[in-house]
Every structure is written in C-alpha cells, then in structure tokens.
Image (cartoon, rainbow, N blue to C red):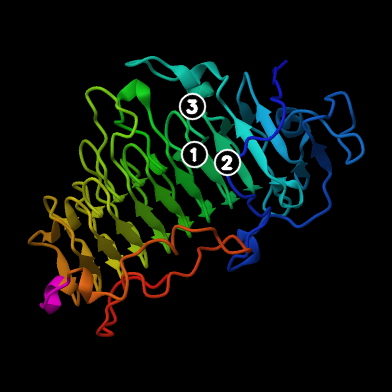
Amino acid sequence: MRTVGVLAGLLVLGAAVPATMATATAEETSAAATPTIVVAVNGDDSAPGTLARPLRTIQKAVDKARPGDVIAVRGGTYGMTDNITITTSGTASQPITLESYQGERVVVDGEQLPASHTPVGGSIPRAERGAIHQEASHWRISGLEIVNGPYGIYCDGCNNNVFSGLRTHDNYESGFQLQGASSNNQILNLDSYGNRDPRKNGESADGLAIKEGSGSGNVVRGARLWNNVDDGFDAWEFTSPIVIEDTVAYGNGFNRWNFPDFAGDGNGFKMGGGDPDPSVAHTLRNSVSFKNAKHGVTDNGNPGALALSRNSTFGNAGTGFDADGAGSRAVLKENLSVADGRAAAVGSGTVATGNSWNLGGSWGESSVQSTNPAAITGPRDADGSLPSAAGFLVPRNGTAIGARL
C-alpha cells in the first residue's frame, strides 16, 4: 500500500491558479464536470470520496479513477513520502481529469520524498522521478502547484494529455519533463521556476524539458520559464518536431544556490542537441527570451530546419539567436535582438530574412518602447493566460518584427 502523509496548513507561496484555463479548443481544456472523486487534507482514504466524505490522498483517488472520472482536490498542502504514480489511462472520449476544486490552492509537496535528496553524483530511480510520475494517456491535469520533488512532473510514454495552469517550482530536478514515446500532449500556461539539481551541480534542471524521446504533435503555449538552474526550455535528443509559442524564458542559468563546480547552461530556449545531434524541425514563434546567462535561443548543434519566427531576445549574456551548428538549416524570419551580447550567429545553411540584424540600424534599449518586464512577469489573467505586455520589446519605429505578447 502506498503511504502518503499530509502536512498541516497551507504553504503560502503565491496566488491560486484557476482550475480551468481558457484555450483555443475544447481539446485543450480540462473537463468542467461534477467531481466524481473528491480529495481533501482532512479526508479519509476509507471514505467514498464524495464532497461530504472526501478521500485524504491524491494517490488513492488516482488509483480509483477510471475513464471519464473527475478528481477534484480541495485546497491545502499534500506532503508525500511516496510519489503520486499515474498508470491508468483514460480514453479519447472519456479522459480522466485531475484538478483543483473550484480554483482552490492545491500544493503537492515532495520535500519528504527520498529521491528529492539524492546525493551529488547519484541517480534517481526511474519510478521515483517526479512528485507526480505519469505513464498514462488521456488525462487533463490542471490548477496544481508542484514543489520540492525529484522533478515536479515526470511523464514518460504519455500521449494525448492536456496539462494546464500548473506551477512547478523549487523542485530538485526539472519542473516538468516529458520524454520517451510521447505524442500529442499540450502544455498550456505553465509557470516553472526556481528548479535546481544539487546532485548534478546545475547541469540538468530545466523549467520545461521535452527530451530524450520522440512523438509528434507536442505543443507548448503560454508558458513562463524562469530562474531555473540550467535552461528555460530544453529539447535535448527529442527527435520529433515540437511547437513552442507565446512563451517567455528569462533569468536561467545563474548559480543562485552556490553550487560548487557549477554546470548550468543558461539558455532561454535550447532547441535540440544530442550526441550525435538529431536533425529536428522544431518551431519557436512569438516568444521572448531575456537576461539568460547564455543564449536567448540556440540550436545547440541541431542541424534541422528549425523555424524561428517573430521572437524577441533581450539582454542575454551570449547570442540572441544562435543557429550556426554544423549543417544548420534553420529559418529565421522577423526576429528581434535587443542589446544581447551578440545579435545572431548563423551558419552557411541558415536562412535569415527580415530580422533586426538584417535590417541594419541600432537595436539598443532605446529602440523599443519598453525593456521593463514587470507586466509580462506579473500575475496571470483570470483565465490563466499571460498578462498583457503591450510595448515590451516592441520597436518604437513600428517595424513588424519580434513578439507581441
């Protein structure tokens, strides 16, 4: 029997996240249905799991859930001595939903998990990866906050899932990692920040990693990935195209934890890479990367036909757009680099048209309406979408380049 403890009280870390998010299609939303299984910190796992008599642990609810069920978790902090493991799949017509009850603040806390404190040089057993460890398909997971886990969410062999309005922060590995044979997943309005990996001195904890796997149709939209020890987004050795849009990455790759032998990379968006480098045509559009320790956007050696369009970079220590890997066939169109260490590095096979460095002129801080990120880094809108950042990195002269968020 899986044992789960409950920490008393609420962990005050920020505002509640809405249980459901406004998105483009019904496929992207969690089910707005009457709960069939209810969990609360004062519940009892021998109870029927109703609103009047809720279960106590999320794992018990997950074990009971069948296609079409809706698990609603009441507000509170759920501390664990074993991770939440999801292995039962829903179906296309009857997905399984796991969400916060009516937007109440639910914190899944992995501080007590043994794997959260893996020593330097150690490895995390596969089954122990993630405060939430998922190997299942057709789930809708929304409105949860996952902290202090050995990874926040770890999803391997996951298909046709929608993850919306999640906050994954201060975990001991990547905030969210999708890998293996995983297709048609949507990661929407994710906030992932402050994740670090003491066991690797900062080498691998990203805000969001879709890596070491394959599968078509994976989409990231409306994410914010900041102050992670390694990269904001990482597509290392994922061999199928990923679409990332309307997403922000900043402040990644700095040694805020004083790790010895620091190994964090510090890219906003790492668009591939491997050994050898797979050739993959990932897409990044209408996204912003600023003040990262290394590059704003990098192909990381990926020779594929990356599609980079209408993105903005600002104040990155390295290159705004680094697409000069051997054999690179990247296509860069209408991107904007402002006050980066270097605007762009492009290879002989790279196509770059209509970008700020192609247009000439000065693209310093005074060339845009605002370099103040306060708006884009502030509270999300009521529907979970990114806050408006009108004027942020928008050219004063009206040139139609760069992101509009």
Q: Which residue is mark 1?
A: 169
Asked whether the beta carbons under mark 2 and mark 1 sit within 8 Å of each other, the answer is yes
Q: CA distance from mark 1 to mark 3?
A: 11 Å
Task: Identify the element where label 1 is drawn.
Answer: strand
**Residue placed farthest to the bottom in the image?**
398
The amino acid type of the residue labelled 3 equals Pro
Work out how far the residue at label 2 is from the one at label 3, CA to CA, in angstroms. 19 Å
Mark toward the start of the polypeptide (1 vs 3): 3
| Residue 137 shows up from this direction | no
Report the residue marked by disc 2: 13
The disc at residue 91 is: none
- Of label 2 and label 1, which has the lower sequence position? 2
Q: Residue at x 48, y 44 (%)?
A: 182
Q: Look at the image and give the residue range highlighted in magenta.
A: 357-363
Give the mark nearer the N terminus: 2 vs 3: 2
Left or right side of 102 for 302: left
**In this image, 131 relative to 45: left or right?**
left
Q: Looking at the image, which residue sits at the far left? A: 348
Say which element carries label 2. Answer: loop
Q: Nearer the viewer, residue 224 or 186?
A: 224
Q: Quadrant of residue 234?
A: top left
Which circle, 2 or 1, is nearer the viewer?
2
Specify the amino acid type for callout 1: His
Is residue 223 located in the magenta-colored stretch of the structure? no
At x 37%, y 75%, the residue is 391
